[in-house]
Amino acid sequence: MKEFKKCQSCSMPIKKVEDRGTEENLNPSSMYCKHCYQQGEFTQQDMTVDEMKQTVKEKCIEMGVPKVLSGMFVKNLHKLKRWK
Ligand SMILES: [Zn+2]
């Protein structure tokens, strides 16, 4: 199975297996990060793509990610698998 290098929900890069979310059987998810996906379910199921963009933007500022980079994350966020 293909393992995505970035979360298909929030577009954050996934570098280590510890950063991955978990499936129902607690295997690491190939698609989503631990912030978005736990035990086979999205942590915030009602979230819209616009809310996610806002959250990612705030998170990036919090983590000191350069504006250009966070802008890129957010710009393509709606193209990710979760939002199709
Ligand atoms: Zn995520």
Image: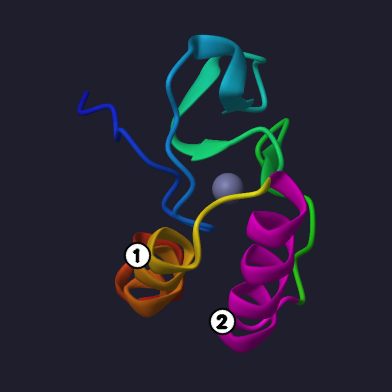
Q: Which of 1 and 9 is in front in this view?
A: 9
Splitting the image into 4 quarters, where does residue 14 fall? top left
Position of 19 relative to 63 (above/below): above
In this view, 19 is above or below 54: above
| Front position in the image: 37 or 10 | 10
Q: Using the rendered view, name the quadrant where residue 11 is placed.
A: bottom left
Q: Name the residue under label 2.
A: 49
Residue 78 is drawn in which quadrant? Answer: bottom left
Q: Position of residue 39 (x, y in %)?
A: 73, 30
Query: Could you say where residue 19 lies in the image, as x and y percent from the top left?
Result: 59, 22
* Horizontal side of residue 73 vs 10, given as left or right: left
- Residue 16 bears which disc, if any? none
Q: Mark 2: few, some, or many residues within 10 Å (few <14, many ≥20)?
A: some
Screen quadrant of the C terminus: bottom left
Q: In which quarter of the image is the N terminus?
A: top left
**Residue projecting furthest to the left:** 2
Task: Classify 10 Å Cα crowding around label 1: few (below 14), some (14-19), many (20 and above).
Answer: some
In 3D space, how far apart are the residues under numbered discs 2 and 1 (Cα atoms)?
Answer: 10 Å
Extreme-bottom residue of the structure: 50
Magenta highlight: main SS: helix
Q: Tag 1 or tag 2, which sits nearer the N-term?
A: 2
Picture residue at 36% right of the left edge, 78% below the top: 75
Per the rendering, the mark at residue 80 is 1
Indicate the position of residue 26 as horizontal and vertical percent values. Answer: 67, 15
User: Residue 29's spot in the image, x, y percent?
Assistant: 50, 27
Give the magenta-colored segment's residue range: 47-63
Secondary-structure class at tag 1: loop
Q: Is residue 58 magenta?
A: yes
Tell me which amino acid carries mark 2: Val
Q: Residue at x 40, y 59 (%)?
A: 69
Three-letter code for the amino acid on which mark 1 is drawn: Leu
* Circle 2: element type: helix
